[in-house]
Structure formats: structure tokens, C-alpha cells
Image (cartoon, grey):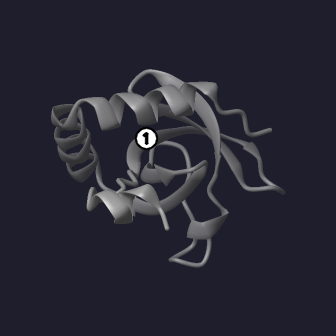
Amino acid sequence: MYSAVRDRTPAVCLAIPGQILEIVDEENRLAKVDVAGVRRNVNIGLLDEAGGGVGPGDWVLIHVGFAISQVDEEEARATRDLLERMGADYEQELEELKASVIE
């Protein structure tokens, strides 16, 4: 069993907001996004079927290198503010994002 189940401490999975800066690989659906000053490539392909996809200037929620949902700027900022108040979990997610590489 997972330690989170044994300890009754729920595991936290975060989706963090980022703004798409540019499409870097159209064929593989990779885009460069900015997440609180951290710029990384993420896969935006999951959003292609949800209304035509996303592009530069759009805000998305990102989890493990994939854009999983499109949000408006107001929701993105509210989500980021909430995550920043969470403290350590958000900081850990940002550190993991900094360390990740998708090419």
C-alpha cells in the first residue's frame, strides 16, 4: 500500500497554471510555457480535441508535462495565488518543473 494510505495523509497532485509563449513543435504538439518565470516545453496535444486546441497567449493547467485544461487568465492567477499559499507542495512542484525536460 502507498504510505499516503497507511498514514492517512492524502497525496497531493497539483496542476499548475502556465501561459503558452509559442508552439515549438507542431507535429508533436509541444509548446513553450511560462510558469511563474520558469519556461519549459509541455505537451498540449490533450487539448486538441477540446475545441480546436490552444496557442500562444492561452493559459493552461499543467500536470507532469502535459497541459490538461485551458483556463482564462483570471482563473490562472487565482489558482497560482492559491498554490502559492499552499507553500511547500507548490514549491516542490516548481522545482520538479525546473528539473524537467521535454524535447
The residue closer to the viewer here, 86 or 54, is 86
Where is residue 102? Give x, y as percent.
74, 39
- For residue 80, side relative to residue 16 (left or right): left
The residue lying at 61 percent from left, 48 percent from top is: 65
Give coordinates of residue 35: x percent, y percent. Answer: 44, 32
Relative image position of residue 22 (x, y in whole percent): 62, 38
Q: Quadrant of residue 86?
A: top left
Residue shown at the point (44%, 63%) measured from the top left: 69
Amino acid identity at mark 1:
Gly
Q: Mark 1 Cα within 10 Å, few/some/many (few <14, many 20+)?
A: many
Q: Nearer the viewer, residue 37 or 4?
A: 4
Name the image quarter holding residue 9: bottom left
Residue 98: quarter of image: top right
Q: Secondary structure at mark 1?
A: strand
Query: Could you tell whether 28 is left or right of 83 in the image?
Result: right
Q: Residue furthest right?
A: 27
Q: Is residue 95 above or below residue 86?
A: above
Q: Residue at x 62, y 26 (%)?
A: 99
Total numbered badges shown on the rendered structure: 1
Q: Is residue 15 above or below residue 89?
A: below
Residue position marked by numbered label 1 in the rendering: 18
**Quarter of the image with the C terminus in it:** top right
**Residue found 48% across the figure and 31% down from its top:** 34
- Image coordinates for residue 49, horizontal then vertical, percent: 60, 78
